[in-house]
Image (spheres, grey):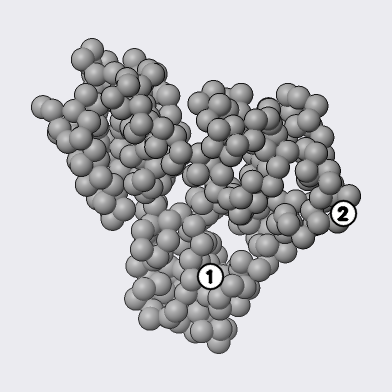
Amino acid sequence: MAGAVAAAGSAEQFQQLLQRPDRSLVVVHFWAPWAPQCAQMNEVMAALAREHSQVTFVQLEAEAVPEVSEKYGISSVPTFLFFKDSQKVDRLDGAHAPELTQKVQRHAAGAAPTPSNASSAQEQLHVRLRTLINAAPCMLFMKGSPREPRCGFSKQIVEILDRHGVAFSTFDIFSDEEVRQGLKTFSQWPTYPQLYVGGELIGGLDIVKELEASGELDTICPKIQKLEDRLKSLINKAPVMLFMKGNKQMAKCGFSKQILEIMNNTGVDYETFDILEDEEVRQGLKSFSNWPTYPQLYVKGELVGGLDIVKELKESGELLPVLKGEN
């Protein structure tokens, strides 16, 4: 039925929905009933389904069909996968309604826009370019990647930024011809690499060399904070810090949901950090604390433990004193 969201309750149903011959794009929402952000994104999906009748939208309960979730590496909810001709073409992790809308519009549009919707396609491209430019405080659009630059100018600019300890993210303009051509017009800068700080164009290699020579580069670009210093700062951000999948409002795994319920019943104030939003912290904290799993609870900068430890402390009556720093 046009405008409706289908449900896949088994791997077989999932495969059948992928292979429907009348639809070019299939968008699958891997969700869980215990996560409120999934309910919100289901509403977004329903709205998108009404708007894009040619697209198949599917809900799949991640924990109910584990063989499909495992096949596609689903480790948190909500996660969205995009398929064309049964092949995965894109992915979105997390409850990001604007990005989901953009991806659906982009993939549903498919080929070159017709003259009637050329202006809206241009607007969508500009929205996308602005999003990319602001994806990090310092963004470098280059040929290739920092590890494998694919032109001498890109290699030189990466070396300069590394030499000055600049914290920067990159976008490989060879990976997306639309961005490669569109950004030249958008920024009125005809060549690559292009460096942006705070969403503003700084310039290319020559400009960066001039800034390095004048000493201004160090004042303009954000610096890398050493990971260990950053982790110490994060675990001491509040007297009680919980590192989890999701946040206070929206847990993204069952263990995190359980620990939130226990913490909320103590009446003690605490802050959370979503480790799914930062891969560096997610991996680094495991080594730093010598604790391999999440959630992780810290009081006054000291590791208390994970869900099992917190459950034991609750059962023994020790949890409240520990959270208040009395133990």
Neighbor class of circle 2 (other Cα within 10 Å; few <14, some 14-19, many 20+) is few
Task: Identify which residue, 18 or 203, lies in the foreground.
Answer: 203
Q: Residue at x 15, y 32 (%)?
A: 3
Residue type for callout 2? Ser
Of the pair 317 and 211, the residue shown nearer to us: 211
Residue 19 vertical position relative to residue 14 in the rendered view, above or below: above
Residue of label 2: 214
Secondary structure beneath dot 1 equals strand
Write the residue at 89% across / 50% down: 213
Q: Nearer the viewer, residue 273 or 67?
A: 273
Pointer 1 residue: 241
- Where residue 327 sits, quadrant-wise, is bottom right
Give the left or right position of residue 322, taking residue 202 as reference.
left
SS at mark 2 in the image? helix
**Residue 35 appears anywhere in the view:** no
Distance from Cα at disc 2 to Cα at disc 1: 42 Å
Label 1: few (<14), some (14–19) or many (≥20) C-alpha neighbours in 10 Å: many
